[in-house]
Image (cartoon, helix red, strand yellow):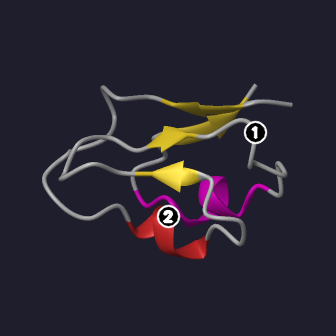
Amino acid sequence: MKIIIEKRRCPQNHPCPSVRVCPVNALIQVGFNAPEVDENKCIKCGKCVKFCPMRAIRTE
């Protein structure tokens, strides 16, 4: 399983709420840009996927 960020679905005008729920800080957001996933840290728990209100984060 891999976590995918769909940038076209992400409004990129606010702090990403999913960043706060990641238990291992694998989501990184610079400014208000769409977050990126640090694959080395990600434990694929899916919390960010469930928490994203725009459904911009998904699994593959």
Residue 17 placed where, x, y %? 40, 69
Looking at the image, residue 46 sits to the left or right of residue 38; the answer is: right
Residue pointed to by mark 2: 18
- The residue at the far front in this view is 40
Q: In which quarter of the image is the C terminus?
A: top right
What stretch of residues is rendered in magenta? 46-53
**Going 35% across and 29% down the picture, which residue do you hit?**
7
Give the alpha-carbon distance from disc 2 to disc 1, as whole Å. Answer: 18 Å
Which label was assigned to residue 32? none
Q: Where is residue 15 in the image (x, y as percent from the top left)?
A: 26, 65
Where residue 11 sits, quadrant-wise, is top left
* 58 or 26, nearer to the observer: 26
- Residue topped by disc 1: 40
**22 with respect to 34 (left or right):** right
Where disc 1 sits, the SS reads loop
Name above or below for residue 3 compared with residue 52.
above
Does residue 10 lie above or below 17 as drawn?
Answer: above
Residue in view at x 49 percent, y 64 percent: 18
Q: What residue type is labelled 2?
A: Ser
* Badge nearest the viewer, 2 or 1: 1
Kindly identify the residue that appears in the image at 23 percent across and 42 percent down: 33
